[in-house]
Amino acid sequence: MPAVARPSPATAPRADNRLPLILDAAAGFFADKGYGYTSMRDIAGAAGMLPGSLYYHFASKEELLVAVYAEGVRRIKAAVAPALARDGDPWERLEQVCAAHLAALLEDSDYGQVVVRVRPDDAPVVAAQLVALRDEYERTFSQAVAGLPLPPRTDRRALRLMLLGALNWSQTWYRTGKESPQSLARRFVRLLRDPLES
Amino acid sequence: MPAVARPSPATAPRADNRLPLILDAAAGFFADKGYGYTSMRDIAGAAGMLPGSLYYHFASKEELLVAVYAEGVRRIKAAVAPALARDGDPWERLEQVCAAHLAALLEDSDYGQVVVRVRPDDAPVVAAQLVALRDEYERTFSQAVAGLPLPPRTDRRALRLMLLGALNWSQTWYRTGKESPQSLARRFVRLLRDPLES
DNA sequence: CAGCATACCAAACAACTGTTTGTTTTGGGA
DNA sequence: TCCCAAAACAAACAGTTGTTTGGTATGCTG
């Protein structure tokens, strides 16, 4: 079953295919206006085509969202992967993972921002797919927390939720230029790592 | 200047006024469908009146949002105030403030949820007002962090952003019944307070 | 009880929404 | 070069959106 619902091609796709343009345009709008506030005409216009033409590539607006969302998850995972792979101090590793995560959803590309910004419920028909995609990434993130040498009885689930929440919510207040994702990640991890009560 | 734009009343409002009904209905929809996904017809229907009638009380949908949002901030502040007022261990105080904050935006009322859920940009004309309201509350929250006995050089701003982010993001994954706001607040504050590296 | 502003109804408006349908262009394999 | 599917156009559809306008009922004040 193809990810994109279209008349299954008997031959190869053509070279002048504008599908990537559509995805980029959609990601751009979804990222900074939100899903519901973006019209198919917005997207078509930015991609240099007519609204109806989008339906050759996607069966519906929601299916288009799924495609963008999936690409977003793919990119965030790819951004985090190198940091996750390296060994050494687990706290250092966590910090790098957070930095990569932040960079992906604050600066790098529109696709990453979509994953954090768009609520699955906004697209009821495909909501379950979106949640599954998000969960898929969160399992990745969990590995960074799992590697930490923590005192016994420490609530690792709460730690993960807290950290991920702080990172994702930063999209609300973060303004590019003032502080890098790198240093922000450092600050957050330090607050957890270093004892605040002496 | 009245908060609500309407023909400034020469006499007192009438007793059968359905304005509170409108606000409640709007808060309900804004809280669980979002601002953009709620129509004036949704609200009017739930309040038992016709769409056009809403415009007697509010000049526009955005003004209606401002009213709901302001009430939301008022309620959160009111919920947090008692915890903030008590003296004793500052960490204990912070935990109670967080618990009250969480309760307000996860369970207590729709108004509180609106403040966290609705993005100011969704209502461009009044976005500045919404941001001002949100900032107003965050200053309140800051006091709980300011009272903490922390090691010198501790980044209190980052601490505030991290904690508030974690709390607000919980709206994304929290499911009522499984865990109380109280215990969740305890977990979060503990992670900050207790040293994680031995 | 008279008068009047309050509070709402009733009906429409233009603009915009996602989507469909039939038709046309065009690139690439035979 | 022929041909067919890929990819897009052109134009419309029905439904929904926020909002406006003019009329009407009704609670409160004097």
Image (tube, coloured by chain):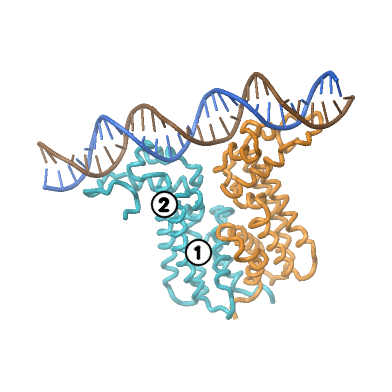
Chain colours: A orange, B cyan, C brown, D blue
The percent coordinates of residue B127 (x first, y second) are: 46, 53
Is A84 situated left or right of A38 in this image? right
**Residue type (three-letter) at the residue carrying disc 2:** Val
Q: Which residue is located at x 34 percent, y 38 percent? A: B53
Give the x, y percent position of residue A67: 69, 42
Residue at (34% x, 50% y) in the render: B4
SS at mark 1 in the image? helix
In the image shown, does A4 or B103 lie closer to the viewer?
Answer: A4
Q: Quadrant of the N terminus of chain B?
A: bottom left
Q: Amino acid at mark 1?
A: Ala
Ranked by sequence position, the earlier of labels 1 and 2 is 2
Quadrant location of the C terminus of chain B in the rendered image: bottom right
Between label 1 and label 2, give the one nearer the viewer: 2
Residue of label 1: B99
Q: Position of residue A15 (x, y in %)?
A: 78, 36
Numbered circle sitting on residue B66: 2
Q: Which element type, helix, strand or loop, lies under badge 2? A: helix
Instruction: Give the left or right position of residue B148, taking residue B78 as reference.
Output: right
Chain under numbered label 1: B
Rendering quarter of residue B76: bottom left
The correct choice, above or below, for A179 with respect to B105 in the image is below
